[in-house]
Amino acid sequence: MHIPSRTSLTQQVGASRLETPCQGLRHGVASSKRFVPVVLVVAVWLCVAGTSPGLAKKESHLDNLNPKDFYLEQLLKGVPPTLKSFIEETGRFGQNGWTVDSQEVIYPLAYLYTLKDPRNSFSGDKTLLNAALKGGDAICDAQYADGTVEFVQSDGSSWGRIYPHETLLAWLETYDLLKDLLEGDRKTRWE
């Protein structure tokens, strides 16, 4: 059985076709002669779809939605179940097992505590402040000296040590919102 060498292939196909894989698109099966009609068909279809009443976008209740109002409403709705999952003694969130990422709720709690808005019934609520601060303490308690935590699943199984980026971001944002309220040992641990 004869296996052609690269030199003989180059002579048969032409050196320019073997320089890069993408060059085959210009010289081979997907030539520009076939590309142009496809582009034209797609362009015509997009024009027709945009002007035809049957294919045009139907109005949605989301069209009139104010994102700021929507997200504030969602945050406010989330407070009661979040506080229900809070374990005062440990500062952890999650009644049915705990994972370090369960602590990420400290950021929205701190945000709502500090948010001055007439629709925010939790502004200045000490319950939210306490939960956010103790939740941050629970992150401190879970950390090793290098900043990693043991990634424990809610079923108790461990996946080893990790840097919990999202949790640390939530903790950092919480710190930024509440840093003037931190005192003593807590302030030292958080900084």
Image: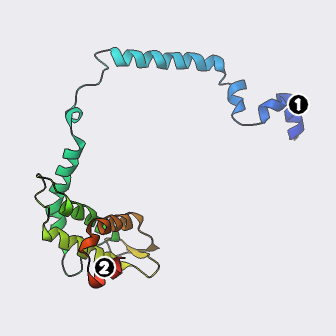
Q: Secondary structure at mark 1?
A: helix
Res 185 → quadrant: bottom left
Q: Whole-percent x and y of residue 149?
A: 41, 76
Label 2: how many residues lie within 10 Å, few (<14), some (14-19) or many (20+)? few
Query: How many marks do you count on the picture?
Result: 2
- Amino acid type indicated by mark 2: Lys
Q: Which residue is outermost to the front?
A: 180
- Compute the Cα span from label 1 to label 2: 74 Å
Residue depicted at 37% across the width and 76% down the height:
191
Q: Which residue is outermost to the bottom?
A: 185
Res 59 → quadrant: top left
Res 44 → quadrant: top left
Any part of residue 176 in sight: yes
Query: In the displayed structure, would residue 10 be above or below residue 120?
Result: above
- Amino acid type indicated by mark 1: Gln
Residue that badge 1 annotates? 11
Instruction: Name the residue nearer the viewer: 134 or 158.
Output: 134
Any part of residue 93 in sight: no
Sequence-first disc among 1 and 2: 1
Q: Secondary structure at mark 2?
A: helix
Residue depicted at 24% across the width and 43% down the height:
67
Query: In the displayed structure, would residue 38 be above or below residue 183?
Result: above
Residue that badge 2 annotates? 187
Q: Is residue 29 left or right of residue 70?
A: right
Query: In the displayed structure, would residue 3 be above or below residue 63?
Result: below
Dot in front, 1 or 2: 2
Quadrant (top left/top right/bottom left/bottom right) for the N terminus: top right
Instruction: Name the residue nearer the viewer: 81 or 159.
Output: 81
Q: Whole-percent x and y of residue 115?
A: 19, 58
Label 1: how many residues lie within 10 Å, few (<14), some (14-19) or many (20+)? few
Instruction: Name the residue nearer the viewer: 148 or 97.
Output: 148
Q: Whole-percent x and y of residue 186?
A: 29, 81
